[in-house]
Image (cartoon, rainbow, N blue to C red):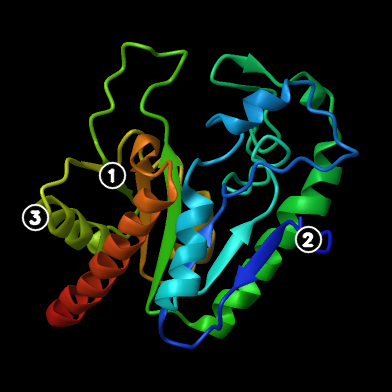
Amino acid sequence: MMDGLPYRQVGEVIPGRIVCVADHASNYVPEDINLGVPSSLLEEHIGWDIGVEGIADRLSRRHNIPAHIATVSRLVCDMHREEEHPNVVPMSSDGHTIAGNIGADVEARLDRFHRPYHKALGEWLETANPALILSLHSFTPKLKTEPDEERPWEVALLYNERGEPAQHAIRLLREEGLTVGENEPYSGKDLNATMNRHAEAHGRPYLAIEIRQDEIINEAQQARWAALIVDIANRTLLAMNATA
C-alpha cells in the first residue's frame, strides 16, 4: 500500500480521455492482517489478477492512459464486490479456506480499504469525465474446483446493462483472430460491481476486459496486450462516435 492507501493513481488525468481501473492488481497483505493461508497462495489467482498490474502501469506510463490501481489483495478486501456482498471479505476462494477471514471485522475492513478506494475512484472519475473507462481483470485458465471446465477465450468482455462499447470491442478483437468471450467466464449481469457503481450509474461508457492469465504472465506479453488494448479502445470510441 502506498502511504497506507488502498489505491494508487498513476498518470495525469486529462478530462475527456480514456482511463483505466484495476480492482485486483495487487496481492499485498498488510502486516497486521493474518489471512491464515500460505504466502505462496497469494501468488496464485485467488490473491490477485495475475498480469493486470503490469498492463495498467504500462497503459499509464507508455500510452498516456491514467490508472486507478488497487494496492491490497482481494483476499483482504475485494474492491470488486458491493459492500453487502458475502465475499467482500472472502472466507474461501477456489477451494481454499481463508481461515483468517472467518469472524473478521468486515465493517473495519470496509472502512479501511473498500470505502476509501471507491471514494477516491469516484472523485477521480468526476475529474476525468472519461470518454471511456477500461476496467482490467484477468482470469485463470482453469479453476481447481472445476478442473473439467473449458475456458478457451484469450480475452472476454463483460457488461451488465450498457453493452454497446463491449459489442464493438468484441467484434474488433475477433477481427484480430482472437477467441473472444461475451460475458465469460462469468457474466457482468452477475458480477460488475465497480462498473455498475462508477460507470453505468453515471452513464459513462466502459470496457470491462478479462484477459486469460497465461496470456499476460511476463512483461513482453503485458506490453503486447497493453498496445492491443489501446488500439481496441481507440477504435471502439471511433465506432461509438460513428453510430451516435
Look at the picture and state if 43 lies above or below 124: above
- Measure the C-alpha gap from mark 2 to mark 1: 30 Å
SS for dot 1: strand
For residue 5, which quarter of the picture? Answer: bottom right
Circle 2/circle 3 CB separation < 8 Å: no
Who comes first in sequence, dot 2 or dot 3?
A: 2
Check disc 2 and give the amino acid type.
Answer: Leu
- First reached walking from the N terminus: tag 3 or tag 1: 1
Mark 1 belongs to which amino acid?
Val
Q: Residues within 10 Å of mark 1 (few under 14, many from 20)?
A: many
The disc at residue 5 is: 2
Label 3 secondary element: helix
Q: Name the residue beneath numbered marker 3.
A: 175
- For marks 2 and 3, give the CA distance: 40 Å
Image quadrant where one finds the N terminus:
bottom right
The count of marks equals 3
Q: Residue furthest bottom?
A: 15
Mark 3–mark 1 CB contact (< 8 Å):
no
Query: Looking at the picture, does residue 71 appear above or below residue 198?
Result: above
Q: Are marks 2 and 1 in contact (CB under 8 Å)?
A: no
Residue at image mark 1: 155
Is there any visible trace of residue 196 in the rendered image?
A: no
Q: Nearer the viewer, residue 168 or 218?
A: 218
Residue type at mark 3 is: Glu
How would you rate the neighbour count of disc 2 (Cα within 10 Å): few for under 14, some for 14-19, many for 20 or more?
Answer: some
